[in-house]
Image (cartoon, rainbow, N blue to C red):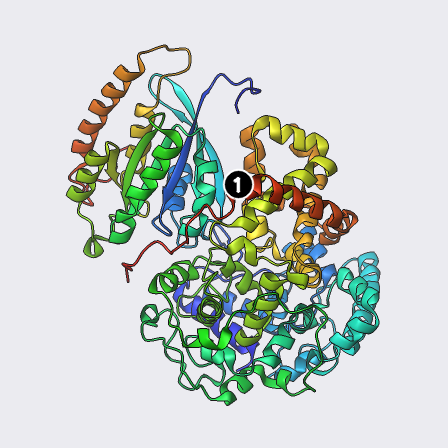
């Protein structure tokens, strides 16, 4: 079953279950809530979903603007729902039963939107230019990545600066998953550890769906989820698909994480039931309005459960921490579970040069406290008026930026903005989160600096954050990348470790998930 | 923190604590918007909301701090509890462990705030009658033992949510201008609330919050 088929069947199931509520998705697969939907019922919804499937492959930054500017709001089906398909679930394309097709772009490749709704001539010309640019970019990326992403590493060694520049311009949507996989170093780790994910994950790797009836949700807390000790290597091979075909051994650009634990041994360890419970409690609270994750028994939640339990076994020192689910979920929208797992290990958690989120997740969250301290320092330099205001009003970064760091913005940035940010985040690491955080506040400074305590905190809450952002994600990223933070971050880190951090360190006991009794 | 504002409103900080997925966000959402839906995201770190509450004799501004429930976030909690007037410690009546853990949450609050805080113990999810693992008597007994207020709610059904916040409002220390013997006031509050608790005690689904 192709990913599009999965999406369509999800959409149809939804329509059957909610005949009175038409299903409309934004271009990233999130359900658009229409308070009192006046247009038709199930039929219309199904039509929208079908339209979504048919009007495939026009997903680039240009669309974001149109959507943001409301141009597509008036057009029906295709513009609103249509783009959704390209994005999260496909990213790899309609016709692509084989994941190899990712290398060649989704279904229609660069053929941008034949069913594109007509626009004004001027905007059409603008659009044409952007399409051409997108096609060119796609070609360059395909060449850089090589088959299965295997070429990126050597490209990065030869032309590091160029690769960096291209990442910052934005990875083409169709190649995003593959590029993340290669850039983060996840691909390298996966090739180095064939079969390990299958051993770590709670159930045999899903695709082909033979006996995958035991869903994550029904896995009964993992008591029966002992990992198959000698799971057949084919299972991993199947999940890896074409990725394991290309010449092995090509080192990815980013270095592997500092601390991949005693992995093979961990595979044998069964999970603390509290960890499993904790993961399960959050499954349907992770992007609950996204078509892929909304269904309790759906493939999204199942994959999320598998990846998170696999990670908890792989890295018992971290286990599961609220927030990780959002990080893993973003990856799962672009990658198969095994690839998402290794990308999670190498990218968000490991990070280039070990600058990942892992320290933020350890007991006592030492990394989070440090990040908030560093951010406060950066804020004083970069946005002094606002920083002063915040300090006067008693607004601490810990009060609004916890999930910025903890999820690398996956929790609070809309996907239109999150994705280009993550392109850079996966290539350049945690400092990207600082830069973007600063940029958000810089761009909204004049609005924020006049606010008193309550309004300030409310404006910065996850729910309201999108309103502070520029409509064009590129504006945000450009501002972010102008903030040079590395040196200051290092200095602030030394300061923290010598001062407040030293006092805090290790004072907090090992964390355990709260509850053993699980309401079924 | 309210030093620079010109508003004469008395402001109170309420912090919501309790295990993962006991319904802290749902209670707040029911109070704020009088709605419940099944698509909440897990709260990561902290969420902040505020609302003005109009009472018979006065108006108060409530600042609601919603927190992440997972144990791992404990090291953040003291910063969130700081300066709070009220701590609402929530458990899920269908999850005994979450009830047992309330003692630690309450301890956390006492450590940070001593006696300068009013604590409410809230058993949520009373709509799930057949999954109940903690009886109302147990909840009440524990509240008495720990000397905190107690109420059971259902954010989903909208049961007792308004009552909870009315009780909270009733227990708030008087407006800054009103000088009153603090000890006396606390006694008074305890008296009032225990009667409310009795009223609220038989919470058959029918007794939907009358307000």
Residue A78: image quadrant is bottom right
| Chain under callout 1 | A
Please say whether residue A296 is visible from this viewpoint: yes
At horizontal 49% and vertical 82% (from top left) the residue drawn is: A207
Question: Mark 1 — residue?
Answer: A503
Residue at image location 50% in from the left, 67% down from the top: A292
Residue A108 seen anywhere in this rendered image of the structure: no
Count of all numbered marks drawn on residues in the image? 1
> Residue A138 appears in which quarter of the rendering?
bottom right
SS state under label 1: helix
Horizontally, residue A360 falls left or right of residue A149, namely left
Location of residue A62 in the rendering, given as x and y in whole percent from the top left corner: 74, 60
Query: Residue A213, located in which quarter of the rendered image?
Result: bottom left
Q: Position of residue A317 (x, y in %)?
A: 47, 61
Camera-side residue of A478 and A231:
A231
Q: Residues within 10 Å of mark 1 (few under 14, many from 20)?
A: few
Quarter holding the C terminus of chain A is bottom left
Q: Is residue B167 above or below residue A123?
A: above
What residue sits 49% from the left and 54% below the top? A37
Q: Nearer the viewer, residue A442 or A350?
A: A350
Residue B10 lies, in percent from the top left, at 44, 20
Of A346 and A118, which appears nearest the observer? A346
Q: Which one is in front, A295 or A405?
A: A405
Q: Position of residue A27 (x, y in %)?
A: 62, 62
Figure check: A211 above or below A17: below
């Amino acid at each position: 079953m192709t990913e599009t088929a999965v999406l369509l069947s999800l959409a149809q199931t939804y329509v059957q279950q909610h005949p009175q509520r038409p299903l409309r998705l934004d271009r990233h697969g999130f359900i658009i809530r229409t308070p009192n939907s006046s247009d038709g019922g199930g039929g219309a919804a199904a039509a929208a979903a079908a339209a979504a499937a048919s009007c495939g492959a026009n997903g680039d930054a240009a669309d974001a603007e149109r959507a943001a500017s409301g141009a597509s709001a008036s057009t029906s089906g295709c513009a609103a729902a249509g783009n959704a398909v390209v994005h999260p679930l496909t990213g790899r394309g309609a016709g692509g039963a084989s994941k190899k097709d990712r290398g060649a772009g989704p279904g229609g490749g660069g053929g941008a939107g034949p069913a594109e709704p007509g626009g004004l001539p001027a905007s059409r010309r603008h659009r044409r230019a952007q399409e051409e640019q997108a096609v060119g970019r796609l070609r360059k990326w395909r060449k850089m990545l090589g088959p299965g992403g295997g070429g990126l590493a050597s490209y990065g060694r030869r032309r590091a600066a160029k690769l960096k520049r291209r990442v910052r311009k934005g990875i083409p949507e169709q190649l995003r998953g593959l590029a993340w996989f290669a850039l983060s170093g996840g691909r390298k780790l996966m090739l180095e550890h064939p079969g390990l994910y299958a051993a770590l994950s709670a159930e045999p790797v899903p695709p082909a769906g033979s006996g995958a009836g035991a869903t994550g949700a029904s896995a009964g807390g993992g008591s029966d989820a002992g990992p198959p000790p000698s799971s057949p290597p084919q299972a991993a091979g199947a999940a890896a698909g074409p990725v394991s075909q290309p010449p092995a051994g090509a080192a990815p650009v980013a270095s592997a994480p500092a601390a991949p634990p005693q992995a093979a041994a961990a595979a044998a360890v069964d999970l603390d039931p509290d960890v499993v419970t904790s993961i399960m409690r959050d499954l349907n609270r992770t992007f609950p309005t996204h078509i892929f994750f909304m269904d309790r028994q759906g493939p999204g939640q199942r994959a999320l459960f598998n990846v998170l339990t696999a990670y908890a076994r792989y890295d018992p020192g971290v286990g599961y921490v609220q927030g990780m689910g959002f990080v893993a979920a973003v990856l799962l929208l672009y990658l198969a579970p095994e690839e998402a797992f290794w990308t999670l290990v190498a990218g968000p958690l490991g990070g280039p040069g070990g600058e990942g989120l892992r320290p933020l997740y350890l007991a006592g969250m030492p990394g989070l406290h440090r990040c908030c301290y560093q951010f406060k320092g950066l804020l004083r330099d970069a946005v002094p008026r606002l920083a002063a205001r915040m300090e006067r009003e008693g607004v601490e970064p810990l009060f609004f930026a916890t999930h910025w760091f903890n999820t690398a913005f996956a929790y609070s940035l809309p996907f239109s903005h999150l994705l280009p940010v993550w392109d850079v985040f996966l290539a350049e690491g945690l400092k990207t989160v600082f830069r973007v955080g600063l940029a958000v506040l810089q761009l909204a400074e004049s609005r924020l600096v006049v606010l008193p305590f309550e309004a300030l905190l409310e404006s910065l809450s996850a729910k309201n954050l999108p309103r502070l952002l520029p409509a064009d994600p590129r504006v945000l990223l450009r501002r972010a990348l102008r903030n040079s933070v590395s040196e200051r971050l290092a200095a602030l880190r030394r300061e923290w470790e010598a001062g407040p951090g030293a006092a805090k360190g290790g004072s907090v006991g090992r964390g355990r998930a709260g509850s053993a009794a699980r309401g079924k | 923190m309210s030093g620079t504002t010109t508003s004469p409103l008395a402001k109170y900080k309420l912090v919501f604590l309790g295990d993962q997925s006991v319904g802290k966000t749902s209670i707040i959402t029911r109070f704020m918007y009088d709605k419940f839906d099944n698509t909440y995201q897990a709260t990561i770190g902290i969420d902040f909301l505020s609302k003005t509450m109009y009472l018979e004799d006065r108006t108060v501004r409530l600042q609601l701090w919603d927190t992440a429930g997972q144990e791992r976030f404990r090291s953040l909690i003291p910063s969130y509890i700081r300066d709070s007037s009220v701590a609402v410690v929530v458990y899920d009546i269908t999850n005994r462990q979450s009830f047992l853990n309330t003692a630690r949450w309450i301890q956390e609050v006492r450590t940070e705030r001593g006696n300068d805080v009013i604590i409410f113990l809230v058993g949520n999810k009373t709509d799930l009658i057949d999954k109940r693992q903690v009886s109302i008597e147990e909840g009440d007994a524990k509240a008495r033992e720990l000397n905190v207020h107690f109420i059971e709610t259902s954010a989903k059904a909208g049961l007792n949510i308004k009552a909870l916040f009315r009780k909270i409002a009733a227990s708030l220390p008087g407006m800054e201008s009103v000088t009153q013997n603090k000890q006396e006031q606390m006694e008074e509050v305890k008296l009032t609330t225990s009667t409310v608790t009795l009223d609220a005690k038989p919470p058959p689904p029918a007794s939907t919050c009358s307000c």
